[in-house]
Amino acid sequence: MSTSDIPDVDAPAPPPTVKRSTGDLVRAAISGWLGTALEFMDFQLYSLAGAIVFSQLFFAGEEVGMAVVLAMATYGVGYLARPLGAWYFGRMGDKIGRRKVLFYTILLMGAATTLIGFLPTYEQAGIIAPIMLVILRLAQGFGAGAEISGAGVMLAEYAPTHRRGIIASLVALGTNCGTLFASAIWAILLAVMVEEDVIAWGWRIPFIASSIIMVFAVWVRLNLKESPVFEERTDVVDGKALGREEMVELATQTNDVRTLQALERKPVKATLVSFFLRFGQAGNSGIIQTYLISFITITLAVQKGVGPEIVIVSSLIGFATIPFVGWLGDRFGRRRMYIVMTSLALVLIVPTMLAINTKEVAWIFVGYVVIHNVAVLGLASMENIAIPEIFGARNRYTLTAIVREIAAIIATGIGPVLAAAWVAATTGSIIPVIVLLGIYTVSALIAAIVAPEWTGRDLTDPRPAM
């Protein structure tokens, strides 16, 4: 029997409800949106730069195919630091609160991205240039490891129960905004500047300009109140969570059955289900939003401006897709919508990839927009509320962040590199892309099928949902 099915008659009386105004909820939503927008702007700036100019700027000594592989590998390096950041900042967030940690992560992540814009190139500094790029990617990843997870947890714990999906989808909308901003900046640069100037100095503009969003996000978070669920936790005293031994003693004294059960049982099923839900979405994101742009630009030899333009169009459509799927999750349940969206994605993978492989710009647009909105944005809309809802209150931030980032490093960090190498080995075939997208999507579908429904559960409950 699921722990969520165990009656709570023996649980102690809950602490007084912490009230938050509509203005507080709006600030929390803006904070999550801005931070996630910056995170995805950072990573999309790099993925587009990697596809368009970084192979020439930082890996100029390699042949074209290998330079692309190295550029994608450096993209993947950012994911190596994310699990460490997830563990470090996640534990801190469960211990001292979400607000402080989200301030630290945005500052670290934004500073690293801005500094990329000041790096010397390989021609200017030799091997030092790619080494410095890797260091900044590691710093970027360390901060990002707990950013989107913290934003999702914060909004989940702020939102009314029956509106969690649509409100938390604002986090996914932030990913869409970041992708859109980055793509728009690159599209403008490529439209108004000659290629020589972009390579010489224009590529620096997007990274330096990202500091504007960072400053605004930092200001918003300075005025943000703590999550009401965190403050309502029975183990939080004077803004700080009790240690395990103290918690056991308190739960025993107060006959807090829920907490004792949470401390005794390991959330194995909850962790596995969350992992594969994330693995599917993250893998699709890495292939579609990162590698596929390189495939279109370099393997299919489509003009460089097409890649950013496609991402812009798809991101604009995503402004409708993301809140709509979030609303459907509230209406019909997260589990059911995961099954529907992943099944739809499986049906669409082959036709959309074949459309892209025609090299016809119109069909490339159609194929990319459809699969991006279904297999990436649709799943991201639900993911940012689904995973926080699955875990218990005491370790929600830590487990959400760790599961998300370990799945990401396996799926998204390795996926684009594997795709680049596999496509190169098969002389530009689209089949490796189709196979990888199928594997990622099936993993999320299976996880949803084996899970019980968890939508709308009590987030103050320290036990996992399954």
Image (cartoon, rainbow, N blue to C red):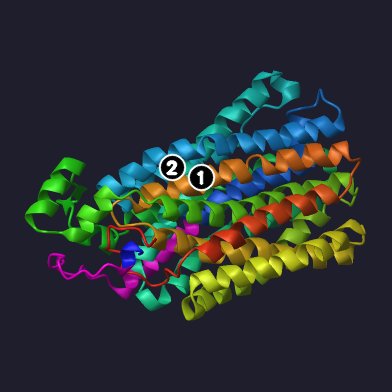
> Which x, y percent locates residue 309?
77, 60
Task: Give the crowd class for mark 1: few <14, some 14-19, many >=20 residues within 10 Å.
Answer: many
Quarter in which the C terminus is drawn: bottom left
Q: Is residue 174 left or right of residue 248?
A: right
Which picture quadrant has residue 71? top right
Which picture quadrant has residue 316? bottom right
Task: Give the crowd class for mark 2: few <14, some 14-19, many >=20 residues within 10 Å.
Answer: many
Given the image, on which type of amino acid does mark 1 rest?
Answer: Glu
> Which x, y percent locates residue 33?
48, 61
User: Where is 266 relative to 153, above or below?
Assistant: above
Residue 405: image tag: 1
Secondary structure of the residue carrying numbered label 2: helix
- Say whether residue 259 is visible: yes
| Residue located at (63% from left, 23% from top) | 131
The answer to the question of whether label 2 and label 1 lie on touching residues, with beta carbons closer than 8 A, is yes
Residue 86: image tag: 2
User: Where is 61 relative to 67, above or below?
Assistant: above
Secondary structure of the residue carrying numbered label 1: helix
> Which x, y percent locates residue 30?
44, 63
| Residue located at (72% from left, 54% from top) | 437
Residue 436 is one of the magenta-drawn residues: no
| Residue located at (56% from left, 72% from top) | 337
Judging depth in this view, the residue of 40 and 326 nearest the camera is 326
Q: Residue farthest to the left?
A: 253
Judging depth in this view, the residue of 233 and 4 nearest the camera is 4
Residue 14 is one of the magenta-drawn residues: yes
Q: Is residue 58 left or right of residue 224?
A: right
| Residue located at (66% from left, 24% from top) | 129
Image: magenta residue range: 5-34
Given the image, on which type of amino acid does mark 2 rest?
Answer: Ala
Quarter in which the N terminus is drawn: bottom left
